[in-house]
Amino acid sequence: MVPISISEQTFLFDAKELLSENVAKAAKINKKTTKLTIKRKAFPLIPAYSMTTHKSQGQTLGKIIVDLVMPPGPLEVASVYVPLSRVKRLDDLLFIRPFEFATLQVKPSTPQIAELKRLDKIAQNTRKRFQFIV
């Protein structure tokens, strides 16, 4: 748990612009000030937003908070790699909670393995065919 302390700010506000012309003149005649000292206290909140992994693809983001605790079901490589690669520095990446190391060890799917085998076969045939060309 991170404690958030209340922030306090004091500033001067001139209410003359909000007053009608007659009231402003009366205040001036009676030597009353139209300037108010305002003190406010609030939690220092910063607007934020969230986005899906798919939405963040192709973007470079400033600072991000990532949750790598994946829901049950098949895991795609993109759902792990994409959020981890959106920032330029490791210091700009924060994990919201601990996660299993196995999450980072995503195995290729059956279609991906089939495609890798197909490409490997093409590469072997190309090497055999052009083995004498340097």
Image (cartoon, grey):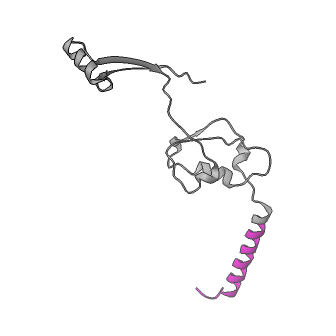
Q: Residue at x 69, y 87 (%)?
A: 129
Position in image of residue 127 (x %, y %): 68, 82
Q: Which part of the image, by quadrant, shows the C terminus?
A: bottom right
Which residue is situated farthest in the front direction here?
22
Magenta part mainly helix, strand or loop? helix
Position in image of residue 102 (x %, y %): 73, 46
Looking at the image, residue 47 sits to the left or right of residue 31; the answer is right
Against 39, residue 63 (above or below) is: below
Q: Which residues are magenta?
A: 113-134
Q: Residue at x 33, y 25 (%)?
A: 18
Position in image of residue 69 (x %, y %): 71, 41
Q: Quarter of the image holding residue 21?
A: top left
Q: Quarter of the image holding residue 96?
A: top right
Tell me, yes or no, whether the highlighted magenta stretch contains residue 116.
yes
Against 89, residue 40 (above or below) is: above
Position in image of residue 37 (x %, y %): 33, 17
Closer to the camera in the image, 97 or 121: 97
Looking at the image, residue 5 sits to the left or right of residue 56; the answer is left
Looking at the image, residue 121 sits to the left or right of residue 30; the answer is right
Q: Residue at x 28, y 18 (%)?
A: 23
Q: Residue at x 51, y 35 (%)?
A: 47
Q: Is residue 14 visible?
A: no
Tell me, yes or no, whether the highlighted magenta stretch contains residue 100.
no
